[in-house]
Image: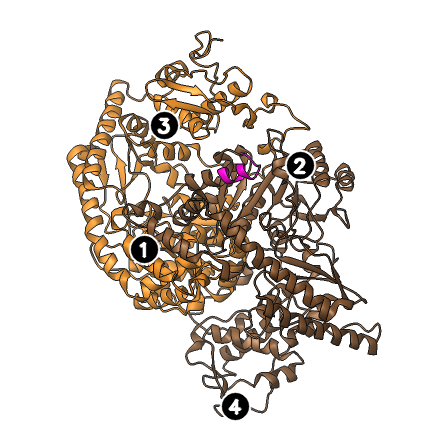
Chain colours: A orange, B brown
Amino acid sequence: MSKGTTGNGNADLGLRLDRSSRTPLYRQIEGGVREAVAAGRLIAGARLPPERTLAAALGVDRTTVVAAYRELAADGLVHAHVGRGTTVAAGMERFPVQGRSDLRAGGAGRPLDWPQLFAPMVEDDPALADIAALAGREEVISFVAGVPAAETYPTRTFRSLLAEALGPGGEGLLQYCPPEGYGPLREAIAARMARLGMPVPPNRVFICGGSQQGLYLLARAFIEPGDTVAVEAPTYVGALQVFRAAGARLVSMPADREGLDPDRLGEMLERRPIKLIYVLPTFQNPTGATLSLERRQRLLAIARRHAVPVIEDDPYGELRYEGEPVPSLLSLADGPTSPVVYLSTFSKVLFPGFRLGWVVAAPPLIERLAWVKALVDLESNPLAQWAVAEYLDRGQLDGHLAGLVPVYTARRDALERALRHEAGEMLSWRAPAGGFYLWVHLLGGLRAREVLAEASRLGVAFVPGDLFHVDGGGRDALRLAFSGLPPDQIEEGVRRLAAALTAVAERRAVAPGRAPVRPTRIV
Amino acid sequence: MSKGTTGNGNADLGLRLDRSSRTPLYRQIEGGVREAVAAGRLIAGARLPPERTLAAALGVDRTTVVAAYRELAADGLVHAHVGRGTTVAAGMERFPVQGRSDLRAGGAGRPLDWPQLFAPMVEDDPALADIAALAGREEVISFVAGVPAAETYPTRTFRSLLAEALGPGGEGLLQYCPPEGYGPLREAIAARMARLGMPVPPNRVFICGGSQQGLYLLARAFIEPGDTVAVEAPTYVGALQVFRAAGARLVSMPADREGLDPDRLGEMLERRPIKLIYVLPTFQNPTGATLSLERRQRLLAIARRHAVPVIEDDPYGELRYEGEPVPSLLSLADGPTSPVVYLSTFSKVLFPGFRLGWVVAAPPLIERLAWVKALVDLESNPLAQWAVAEYLDRGQLDGHLAGLVPVYTARRDALERALRHEAGEMLSWRAPAGGFYLWVHLLGGLRAREVLAEASRLGVAFVPGDLFHVDGGGRDALRLAFSGLPPDQIEEGVRRLAAALTAVAERRAVAPGRAPVRPTRIV
């Protein structure tokens, strides 16, 4: 084989893709190249086929090959040279190959088949990884993640706070701290919640590593394999992942246009035992909707009657752009018989990097969470906890929140305006009064995954609605996160989205009723 | 009942302790007071019995009552007034009571019985909580925790690094980051490990929230309930907790005076399947011992032969006070057939508060760990990761480590000197060449838990040896962590320990063979 070519014109590298596999296509391509290197079919310096060539040979989108080559480059297995293509790096034979063990280099003893050793787990829909890869591409405008606007971060204030913290005596904040959290932060959160109408003593506030960790610890505390968790339809993907990984059976709660229908939930609870109810009552993820006061009260009455804990996930409650606040479930049901476990985070109102959230719960649950947290990571960073406590104690969060409102209002409005202008006749939605998300229904029978396939080619990304459902619903819906994009990017993103919608609608018109080519595995 | 007394001379508050319960005595006292408040037997302003009085009435040590009152005060249920005793706070009836639901205040619906809702879990030995409470008391000299010396923390350097990080453009470090870790930190760790004889590419380095989280994620990745994990006897308590919580069966590996005996481990592996081997080969916790090169090689050969992964936990490897380094298992077994999963942390060489450790593993395992980490807390703090990466890249860790050696050498030497001087005839030990711990055997048939009961009265704390064993071994041993105490504190602590040893030995001499009064539930 002459160096610098892929050998005998083998434009597909001998790769065979399995479209029925749960492994994303780009991972299959990546794995195939690894095996070819390990088997000596591709030697150091060999040039991989150009992305377009390989894509055409394999019948996949070019972006799939781009994603595969990027993974290989990140691992140091190949080098990408501008204008010269991609070549195999030197000396990579000594690193283990994923997958087929017969291709591994020799050595003393049996090679370990690592995946064979892993505990079984519920696999994610591979579309999640594909969408994340798509969203990470530089040329793509991503409505995928609910990331707060980095322009708003109080970076300078926290720079001063950290410098102050690490002044004389500051080594105490680099030490171990209790798993329940740093005392002054628990107190500062309790004080803030009291001002928001949720009076709780500090010992009922538990600090966790963001609300993702809060959910994980709660799942670990409550769920045994086979327990049922009732969720909204649609609901937060990360919660579905955590509950599934804990072995829970997920059921959607009955809902209508106003959201969760408590009376029908009550009927459901008469028929089957439910271990936990998980809700996002305010500026819901993904719909942006807010449950009415009256429904909140009925939900609580039903949860109390059946003694089922209600996890109230409230990351966005303070991000209201218009209208009057609706009381949280926690504030409606404090006291000894409250079934509410409240969860929130600083990730959306400040920034995500400090990994700080909190749970408000009854003392026995706080104690259990602390036990689990001590297993999981001992504690959250006390320096970061001190800085946020000081920020709260100095009363700086209110001013910061006030500054966020015009930023996010402008983004939401830009998104709605652009959607109306570019694609109003193909979509329907309700404007959210707060939070980070717009939930869009596709008209005319379009499917969100089909639109995503086209959108990815046109450089725009979103999350198709079925990923937020546990029962296959939401195929005609998609979520647009507007928080992380400035208005001009939003407008350009919507132009691309509209072009994708048009293209799919036109294909449909040409071949009515024809199933999309690859509706479930798309980048 | 007249306000300001406990009523009709009821010096024990009507409390009944259950000495066979796994709930620590101080928790039982705390719960009893809570119930009395909820039931109206103790009203706001009522004075609790003085600590000594209640201790005498219940037949417990005064420190047990102190711990219970401290918990109640921390919860705001009681107020402690210097010189006026402890009184019940006002308005506490509205908070839920732990435990007996028939005592809870009324309200709409059934009160939730939270503990009843929890998923079952393996309970810790309650002695662990009791020892932690004892170690936390101000007047106690604690040899309990392997805490690095706060005087050594490079606080000023990290103050500058964080200020630099949060300069212009710094908001990127407050953002989300990949679950595998911040790229530059993975690279900096890979570069450092290469210099230490362990060349690994950055994509085989995974960042976790301290080595505790590393262990947790590894347990979650590998262990199904019923799987067997082989551990050293004795070994790190936190690892035992994680493996037990994952449902593992723990078996002790055969050992002799030189530590783990690989040939006998090989025989064991012929007889039964083992999912994971967990070892701390260098400056072991708790023994301080280091496995010889020859045994390391035999251990690896056996693990390879049986294709069993070996977790090499190495928090202390760079904290050597004398002698030549022994190669890590990772460096002895790199390559495609390596069974080694390497784990280390910055908590011991820098400081614990940043919660940063790392795992070196084969790519499929890195991918699995990232998946679990995304569930558990999404990511570790990127700002902290940046700061440590810069610290490494600027070559500052070597100088810092050089500065640690004399500090810890002096502490270890002070401990040995004091032990020889104060209690040499009652103890035996081997000096560790590095790390944080001295493992001491009690001579003359003394039991460590019996000594701890006496020691707690005299104001010194340590961890009894049986807590590091899975099979009841180690009752005649105890662990002394010398890292966190300056030499004068070490000397005073050993004087108290020696007094405790003498007192127990004298009691034994008076009543030979008599069982200790409360050997297993002591503060």
Q: Which residue is mark 1?
A: A159
Q: Chain of mark 4?
A: B
Count of numbered marks: 4
Q: Which residue is mark 2?
A: B308
Q: Which mark is residue A523?
A: 3
Q: Main secondary structure of the magenta part?
A: helix
Task: Kindly report the distance in space between the C-alpha atoms of the residues bearing marks 4 and 2.
Answer: 64 Å
Secondary element at tag 4: loop
Q: Marks 1 and 2: which is nearer the front?
A: 1
Q: Chain of mark 3?
A: A
Q: Position of residue B418 (x, y in %)?
A: 68, 68
Q: Going by the image, does A355 lie left or right of B215?
A: left
Q: Position of residue B468 (x, y in %)?
A: 68, 56
Q: Are marks 2 and 3 in contact (CB under 8 Å)?
A: no
Viewer-side residue, A186 vs A222: A186
Q: Marks 2 and 3: which is nearer the front?
A: 2
